[in-house]
Amino acid sequence: MAVPARTLALRAARLFSLAVITLYPFAVWYGITHGRPDRVALALAGIFLLRLLVFRGLLPALNWLAKALALFGILLCAASWLLKSHHLLLWYPVMMSGLMLALFSASLFSRASMVERLARLREPWLSPRAIAYTRRVTQAWCLFFIINGGAALFTCLYGDMSLWALYNGVISYLLMGLLMGTEWIIRKRIQPGG
C-alpha cells in the first residue's frame, strides 16, 4: 500500500527540522564567525517554526516539550535578529537542558516517571522492580540535565565560540550517548534472562 504524499512530506519535514536543530550549534558558530548571525537567526527561526508545526511525539509530555523548545527557539532567534545581539543565540542549549530538567524532574512527582512512560510504550506491563529502576534512571537524567545545562551556561558566559560549538554540538551529544549506552548495558544485566 502506497504512503500518501502528505504523510511523506510531513515525515521529511520532521526529519529535516530535527537534523537542522541537532546541528544548531554549528549553524550559530558559522553565522557568528563568518559575520552572518542575522541570516542564521532568521533561517533558524524558520526551522523552529517548521518544527513547531510538524512535530508529533509519542507522549503528550514530549509534544509539550518539543513545542516549548521550538517556541523558545523562535523567540531567541527573533530577539537576536531584532536586537542585533547574536549572543542570544548561544542560550538555546541552556534553555533546552532547563526544559528537559523541568519535564523529567516534574515527572518524579507524578504517578509515573518520564522514563517509565517511555518504557511502557514498548512494554505496557512493568514489574515494581522495573518501575523503581525507571525512577532511578529518570533521576540520573535529571542529574545529567543539571550538569549539561551548567556546562552549556559556562560556554555561553566564557565567550569562546569554538568552545561553545564543541561542547554544545559534540561533547554534550557524546555524553548523552554515553549515558544512554550505560543505562542500556545496566538494564540488560538486571533484566531477567538479560
Image: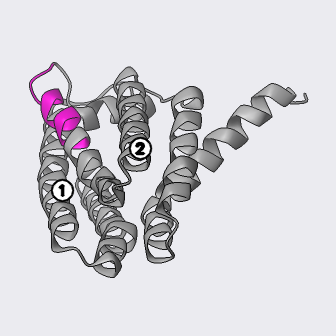
Viewport quadrant of the C terminus: bottom left
Q: Residues within 10 Å of mark 1 (few under 14, many from 20)?
A: many
Determine whether, in the image, residue 46 is placed left or right of residue 163: right
Provide the residue designation for mark 2.
82
Q: Earlier in the sequence, mark 1 or mark 2?
A: 2
Determine whether, in the image, residue 186 is placed left or right of residue 48: left
The location of residue 150, given as percent across then percent down, is 13, 60
Helix, strand or loop at label 2? It is: helix
Q: Is 79 drawn above or below residue 175 in the view shown?
A: above
Marking on residue 149: 1
Helix, strand or loop at label 1? It is: helix
Magenta span: 100-110
Q: Residues within 10 Å of mark 2 (few under 14, many from 20)?
A: few
At 22% from the left edge and 63% from the top edge, which residue is drawn? 152
Q: Is 136 drawn above or below residue 104 in the view shown?
A: below
Quick one: 11 or 25, which is closer to the camera? 25
Viewport quadrant of the N terminus: top right
Does the magenta-highlighted stretch encompass residue 170? no
Marking on residue 63: none
Q: Looking at the image, do the residues carrying marks 1 and 2 touch, with CB atoms under 8 Å apart?
A: no
The location of residue 72, given as percent across then percent down, is 35, 37
- In this picture the colour scheme is one colour
At 12% from the left edge and 53% from the top edge, which residue is drawn? 146
At 54% from the left edge and 48% from the top edge, which residue is drawn? 42
Query: Spatial distance from mark 1 to mark 2, Cα to Cα?
Result: 26 Å
Q: Indicate the amino acid at tag 1.
A: Gly
Q: Is 59 drawn above or below residue 156 in the view shown?
A: above
At 85% from the left edge and 26% from the top edge, which residue is drawn? 4
Quick one: 172 or 31, which is closer to the camera? 31
Residue reaching furthest right? 2
Quick one: 61 or 41, which is closer to the camera? 41
